[in-house]
Amino acid sequence: MARTVLVTGGGRGLGAAIVQTLAAQDFQVVINYNNSKKAAEKLAHDIGVKKAIALQADVTNREEVDRMIQQANDHFGKIDVVVNNALVGFKFDPTTQKAFVDLAWEDYQQQLDGTLKAAFHIAQAVMPQFIEQKSGGIISIGTNLYQNPVVPYHEYTTAKAGLIGFTRNIAAEVGQYGVRANVVSGGLLKTTDASAVTTPEVFDLIAQSTPLRTVTTPQDVANMVVYLCSEQADGITGQNITVDGGLTMN
């Protein structure tokens, strides 16, 4: 039976690439969106109603998350994997990024809420059914910037780095129930809505510094996420898997 995967922020950018790749591999997909209704519904329509549904929820709001999880279960009968991909209010613009001394805690809080709080809500909302069915997967989208801050995006990188500790604690606790938790950390992606404002100089610097002499694409990251959703990856948990052409090496 096909696995059902919920992708937060799945209507555009990396999320849309993940959704499209999942659908091509015969997964059933729940496309979460907050404001991108038109894009998410078009994506679901293009995939087909038997394999995809678009559901609205602000993933920083627990009540909305619970409602979405119930709707997804009502539609497909189950959820097998969740992908924490949604990005809240951030652009990779090195020319407008605030210096550390100019940041307010509120800048950090926005990213902590959009990354960790959202992942917490999603993971906790699906955990009872994962434990009951003795299987499940939680995949969170990280960043290689926490290892190599080519541009010091302080608040974004700090929140993403927190995902690794969050993920490994979950993996350690619920692995006994067959539940897996991993992070996929991409390089700066060329190109998504968030990286559209990134200067060519930054992309060129990354490409020249990378063993493969390339910049990571959304499809590169999507391929790894889809692999981790599959049965072939059921033995992998607690990992931070970096997809960046070798720019950072673990």
Image: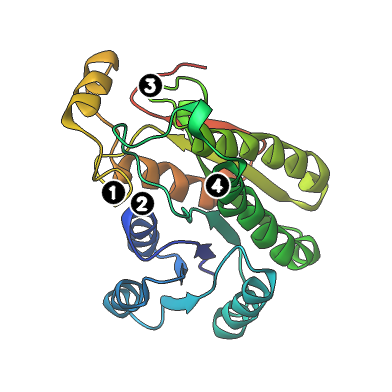
The answer to whether residue 241 is left or right of residue 215 is: right
Q: Residue at x 70, y 35 (%)?
A: 165
Label 3 close to label 2 by CB (< 8 Å): no
Secondary structure beneath disc 3?
loop
Q: Name the residue type under label 3.
A: Val
Q: Name the residue type under label 1.
A: Thr
Q: CA distance from mark 3 to mark 2?
A: 21 Å
Can you identify the residue that label 1 sits on?
192
Disc 1 residue crowd, few under 14, some 14–19, many 20+, Cα 10 Å:
some
Q: Is residue 236 visible?
A: no
Can you identify the residue that label 3 sits on?
150
Looking at the image, tell me whether mark 2 or mark 1 is earlier in sequence order. Answer: 2
Can you identify the residue that label 2 sits on?
14
Looking at the image, tell me whether mark 3 or mark 2 is earlier in sequence order. Answer: 2
Tell me which corner region of the image, top left, top right, bottom left or bottom right, holds residue 173: top right
Label 2 close to label 1 by CB (< 8 Å): yes
Tell me which corner region of the image, top left, top right, bottom left or bottom right, holds residue 236: top right
Looking at the image, tell me whether mark 4 or mark 3 is earlier in sequence order. Answer: 4
Picture coordinates of residue 246, whole percent (x, y):
37, 20
Disc 4 residue crowd, few under 14, some 14–19, many 20+, Cα 10 Å:
many
Label 3 close to label 1 by CB (< 8 Å): no
Can you identify the residue that label 4 sits on?
111
Q: Residue at x 50, y 39 (%)?
A: 156
